[in-house]
């Protein structure tokens, strides 16, 4: 048991991409900035909160001072927390998949979400003890599509036991996440929770969700 599965979080384990979108959109609207759903999924999805706001301001040709950015990230985090307090849903098959693969693979999370958000979801769903390493937004200097998060997770796993990057399978739902995993030298499965299957022609596999998949599917992809 030395091969690894590295999970993105939002849209892969927890079904909350729309909650993140709505929270960011509401904060942006307060400042007179319009963020359409299509634009968000094309330009922001998969990035951390800070990078998302930078993208919104860049598109509007407006300057974003560092102190304002920190304030916007905090406001968005508070709105998101209110929404998941009201409704927390996992991606179909996520819990079953994690429990099925945990005995056979080393598991990690690589996410642009804040650690506090990840911890809340994992504690409420009982999945926290399944993961050997967690890399959150504040753990790396650059978020996806930069591979820093995947490299940090790989390094954390390798400190305990040698692990080749090619023996790691990433599971993602965004273009930014897919690019980050590939740049880190890993294979990648993409879920169609946020984009259609045709959006990822170069993925090692495209799954509608984690439902119906298990250790044999992962093993076949890593052994190609």
Image (spheres, rainbow, N blue to C red):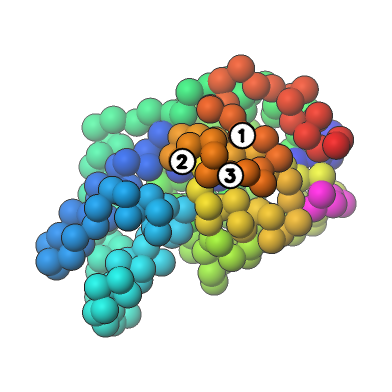
**Which label was assigned to residue 195?**
2
- For marks 1 and 3, the one nearer the N-term is 3
- For marks 3 and 2, the one nearer the N-term is 2
Q: Is residue 200 above or below residue 43?
A: above
Nearer-the-camera pick, 67 or 194: 194
Marks 2/1: CA distance?
11 Å
Image side of residue 65 versus residue 2, left or right: left
Q: Are marks 1 and 3 in contact (CB under 8 Å)?
A: yes
Q: Which residue is mark 1?
A: 206
Image: magenta residue range: 162-166
Residue located 56% across and 20% down the image: 211
Q: Horizontal and vertical percent for residue 199?
A: 53, 44
**Which label was assigned to residue 200?**
3
Marks 3/2: CA distance?
8 Å
Q: Horizontal and vertical percent for residue 126?
A: 50, 28
- For marks 2 and 1, the one nearer the N-term is 2
Q: Horizontal and vertical percent for residue 7?
A: 60, 42
Q: Are marks 3 and 2 in contact (CB under 8 Å)?
A: yes
Does the stretch in magenta take in 163? yes
Residue located 25% across and 39% down the image: 83
Nearer-the-camera pick, 108 or 196: 196
Image side of residue 127 versus residue 150, left or right: left
Marks 1/3: CA distance?
7 Å
Image side of residue 224 versus residue 64, left or right: right
| Quadrant housing residue 223 | top right
**Which label was assigned to residue 72?**
none
């Amino acid at each position: 048991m030395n091969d690894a599965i590295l999970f993105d979080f939002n849209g892969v384990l927890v079904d909350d991409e729309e909650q993140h979108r709505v929270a960011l959109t509401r904060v942006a609207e307060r400042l007179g900035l319009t963020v359409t759903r299509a634009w968000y999924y094309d330009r922001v999805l998969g990035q951390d909160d800070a990078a998302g706001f930078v993208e919104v301001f860049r598109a509007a040709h407006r300057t974003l001072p560092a102190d304002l950015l920190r304030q916007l990230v905090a406001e968005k985090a508070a709105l998101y927390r209110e929404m998941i307090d009201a409704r927390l849903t996992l991606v179909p098959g996520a819990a079953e998949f994690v429990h099925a693969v945990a005995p056979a693979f080393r598991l990690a999370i690589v996410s642009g979400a804040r650690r506090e958000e990840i911890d809340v979801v994992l504690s409420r769903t009982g999945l926290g003890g399944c993961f050997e390493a967690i890399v959150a937004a504040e753990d790396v200097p650059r978020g996806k599509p930069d591979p820093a998060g995947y490299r940090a997770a790989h390094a954390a796993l390798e400190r305990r036991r040698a692990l080749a990057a090619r023996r790691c399978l990433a599971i993602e739902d965004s273009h930014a996440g897919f690019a980050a995993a590939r740049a880190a030298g890993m294979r990648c499965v993409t879920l169609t929770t946020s984009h259609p299957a045709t959006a990822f022609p170069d993925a090692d596999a495209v799954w509608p969700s984690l439902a119906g998949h298990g250790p044999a599917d992962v093993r076949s992809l890593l052994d190609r």
